[in-house]
Amino acid sequence: MGMTIAEKILAAHAGVPVVRPGELYFAGLDLVMGTDVTTALSAEVFAQMGAQRVFDPDKIALVNDHFVPAKDIAAATLAQTMRRFAERYGIRHYYELGSSGICHTLVPDEGLVAPGDLVVGADSHTCTYGAVGAFAAGIGSTDMAAAWALGESWFRVPETIRVIFRGRLPEWVGGKDLILRVVGDLGEDGARYKALEFEGHTIEDLPMAGRFTVCNMAIEAGAKTGIIAADDVTREYLKGRARRHGEYHRPDPDARYARTLEYEVSGLEPLVACPYSPANVKPVSQVEALPVDQVVLGSCTNGRVEDFRIAASILKSRGVHPKLRLIAIPGSQAVFRQLLDEGIVAILAEAGATISPPTCGPCIGGHMGVLGPGERGLFTTNRNFKGRNGHPTSEVYLSGPAVAAATAVMGRITDPRKLT
């Protein structure tokens, strides 16, 4: 019996020819990623363990992104702790404010992940890197400290759910709508500790920005990771970025799956996840006309140049509704520079948007756009749990960039197809 992509990657890193779901292995790691909010605890545990050095300073990435610029003394102290850890142990891939970005945009763009890699990060959306054909999973801060010291971590081999998309995506429908459809069908725990393996002609035609979005939200169905087989689209993206060639795995024809989901997408309309769950998914036509106080465009889920191009095409020559706030958050400093070069920042600013530095701020209810009592937001982020983005009585709806831009123009949730 053959293996899925997830099984092949785990087998290679565990040093065994074959793995099967449910088996436990220690496996070597290609990258360990931490952020400003997770590294301080890991550094404390690392010291308590008596560790004297990290396993490989070139295989660790530390990224300032959650509370940047520092919103208070506590946030500044977290960043300071991470900076000192990086200096002490010679961590080369340390990203400070000004050259940094949201970790799940920055890390693959910096070429730190290659196809076939095994990656862990102390952030649940580390599964984003599956878009380049890697097995990437979130871990806790204690496990990250052990990974720093040992260069390996333990894994239970997950079962894999195969997700096949067929057909051509309609206008204004993209990767966010694909993964919302899957999360809506599976529910918040329908893929608990499983790998989601995405394939089909729709995925093959999907640009990397859409692939990152799809894999980013695999965790919202409870998945351990989300994976897309690396192909020519991946090769083109990695050209000039990748530090290693990697291994381009594909599933074996006789690989065994826990289940298979199949979708025909040619008739799919833009989708929206309603409060208070990413799995509470409805077509935009069912939630139209709800007034909105704030739109957040960006984040690790939809903060790439391609996302802002979509939004700018709608916002150009149109203004943000006077009763609504639009906050635009590029995924990295490099994305921001490209938006400047393409004139997209000017389009956003002229429309009335506030341009934020790369940060996770409003997505985690930290700063740079926290919602007040009873306010309603529409975000292109990945979670909308009660109280996550601000006051417990606030509401957040999740969508792709086209719905977000149309909503910003109209002041209420709007189907972008009605503006063209």
Image (cartoon, rainbow, N blue to C red):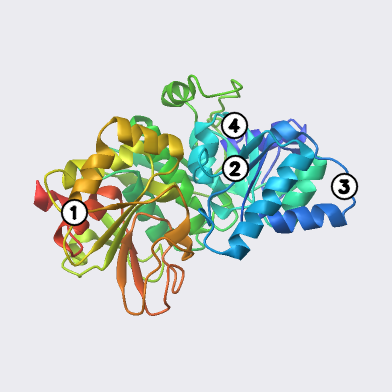
* N-term mark: 3 or 1: 3
* N-term mark: 2 or 4: 4
**Which residue carries the number 2 mark?**
136
Which sits in the foreground, 324 or 168?
324
Q: Amino acid under label 1?
A: Ala
Which mark lies nearer to you, 2 or 1? 1
Percent position (x, y) of residue 260?
A: 45, 47
Q: Amino acid under label 4?
A: Leu
Q: In the visual, does 117 lie left or right of 363? A: right
**Which residue carries the number 1 mark?**
406
Q: Is residue 366 above or below residue 147?
A: below
Image quadrant assignment for residue 96: top right
* N-term mark: 2 or 3: 3
* N-term mark: 2 or 1: 2
* N-term mark: 1 or 4: 4
**Which residue carries the number 4 mark?**
112
Spatial separation of the CA atoms under disc 1 and disc 4: 35 Å
Percent position (x, y) of residue 345?
A: 28, 41
Q: Amino acid under label 2?
A: Ala
Q: Mark 3–mark 4 contact, CB under 8 Å?
A: no
Per the rendering, the mark at residue 30 is none
Image quadrant assignment for residue 166: top left
Q: Mark 2–mark 3 contact, CB under 8 Å?
A: no
- Mark 2 falls on what kind of element? strand
